[in-house]
Amino acid sequence: MAVAIETPFHVLAVDDSLPDRKLIERLLKTSSFQVTTVDSGSKALEFLGLHAHEDSPISVQADQQEAAVNLIITDYCMPGMTGYDLLKKIKESSCLRDIPVVIMSSENIPSRINRCLEEGADEFFLKPVRLSDMSKLKPHILKSRCKEQYQQEQHLQSNSESSNSSNPTNENSSNPTNENSSSTCSNSHKRKANDDEVLPHATRPKHN
């Protein structure tokens, strides 16, 4: 009997620093995640199938995206597109906004952290990222999957209700009035027959 193998969650890690990318990749793989790393926000959007100036995914080659991305972890300070800019692009996309996003930074600036969380980031990690931080990722992925499953169920239910309302059940074409009329006639004949049986025979008058 074949045993189903659980597919590991796929994390897209974004960091312009090679040592930091290697570190986060090692930590994620140690925690049994499938990992894809890129060195910029624009490459992350390209991998996700989203151009920097578009809000809908484009087609991505199968060998480029082996599995759907379940979570994105990105550095905050990057040249060109910052982690915050990447976060905004993802949350503005109707197709990508449900993917959890985690921001990393070596600077502990409360205003920066709050801004990212308000924009939709699920976590904010301070560098250097530790192995213990990896345990915080899976709950966000599971929460996102539950939300996605709920939305799919609601969509299917809505489609089912629309289909039922547009295709009402065909009613019986027979006329109940005719059936009642036939039944009444039949009962009338039965009563007449019964009356004939019950009526006594006429007797002749007696003559004195």
Image (spheres, rainbow, N blue to C red):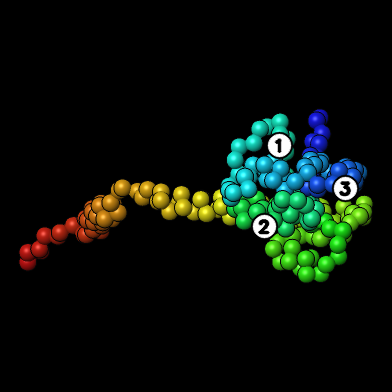
Q: Secondary structure at mark 2?
A: helix
Residue denoted by label 3? 20
Q: CA distance from mark 2 to mark 3?
A: 22 Å
Q: Earlier in the sequence, mark 1 or mark 2?
A: 1
Q: Tell whether label 3 touches label 2 (CB within 8 Å).
A: no
Foreground mark, 1 or 2? 2
Vertical order, 7 against 127 (above or below): above
Q: Secondary structure at mark 1?
A: loop
Taking the spot 58% from the left edge, 48% from the top edge, the residue there is 54
Residue 119: x and y in percent read 69, 63
Q: Earlier in the sequence, mark 2 or mark 3?
A: 3
Label of residue 65 in the image: 1
Q: Is residue 32 visible?
A: no
- Is the C terminus in the top left, top right, bottom left or bottom right quadrant? bottom left
Name which quarter of the figure residue 51 lies in. top right
Q: CA distance from mark 1 to mark 2?
A: 22 Å
Q: Is residue 89 visible?
A: yes
Residue denoted by label 2? 88
Q: Earlier in the sequence, mark 3 or mark 1?
A: 3
Crowding at dot 3, Cα within 10 Å, few <14 / some 14-19 / many 20+, comes out as some
Type of residue at label 3? Asp
